[in-house]
Image (cartoon, rainbow, N blue to C red):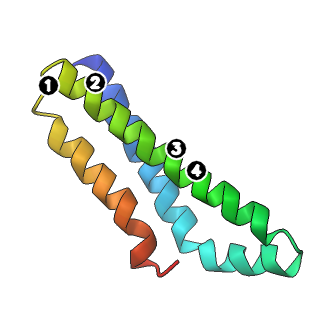
Amino acid sequence: MQKKHLFFTLSIAFLSLAHLIFSYFYIRMYGYFNIHGHLNSFMTVAWLLRFVIDAYIVICGFFAVREERYKVLPFYLLFFLFNLVLPFIFHI
């Protein structure tokens, strides 16, 4: 695996782990921000962060396709689907 794709894969794995931890505490954070009146801003930031993570994974996948690194492409697809389905697993 090329160094660039190794960095992409490790950074996506780290972001996916952070997203998993965030999703676990999402309900509690939702309640906290709802009580303090900041629910709209919390929901907007949460949606933007999810979009940024998914867009980053898609861009890394496009680099892999452009450079004909098809061996790493399944990892990008797996991470993309994991981060896309994660909110539905935790019912958020």
Residue count near mark 1 (Cα–Cα under 10 Å), binned few <14, some 14–19, many ≥20: some
Q: Residue at x 51, y 50 (%)?
A: 51
- Identify residue for label 1: 69
User: Which element carries disc 4, helix, strand or loop?
Assistant: helix
For disc 3, the marked residue is 52
The reply to whether the C-beta atoms of the residues labelled 1 and 2 are less than 8 Å apart is yes
Q: Residue 26, image x and y in percent?
A: 61, 72
Q: CA distance from mark 4 to mark 3?
A: 5 Å
Q: Residues within 10 Å of mark 4 (few under 14, many from 20)?
A: few
Q: CA distance from mark 3 to mark 1?
A: 23 Å
Relative to 81, say whether 12 is above or below.
Answer: above
- How crowded pointer 3 is (Cα within 10 Å; few <14, some 14-19, many 20+) is rated as few
- What residue is shown at x 39% (from left), y 58% (from top)? 83
Residue 87, by quadrant, is: bottom left
Residue at the (21%, 44%) spot, across then down: 75
Give the vertical position of 16 relative to 60 (above or below). below
Q: Amino acid at mark 1?
A: Arg
Q: Is residue 58 above or below residue 31?
A: above
**Sequence order check, earlier mark of 2 and 3:** 3
Q: Is residue 39 left or right of residue 77?
A: right
Marks 1 and 2, the one that precedes in the sequence: 2
Residue identified by numbered label 4: 49
Q: Earlier in the sequence, mark 4 or mark 2?
A: 4
Which of the numbered marks, if any, corresponds to residue 63?
2
The image shows residue 71 at horizontal and vertical percentages of 10, 33
Instruction: State which tag comes first along the sequence, 3 or 1.
Output: 3
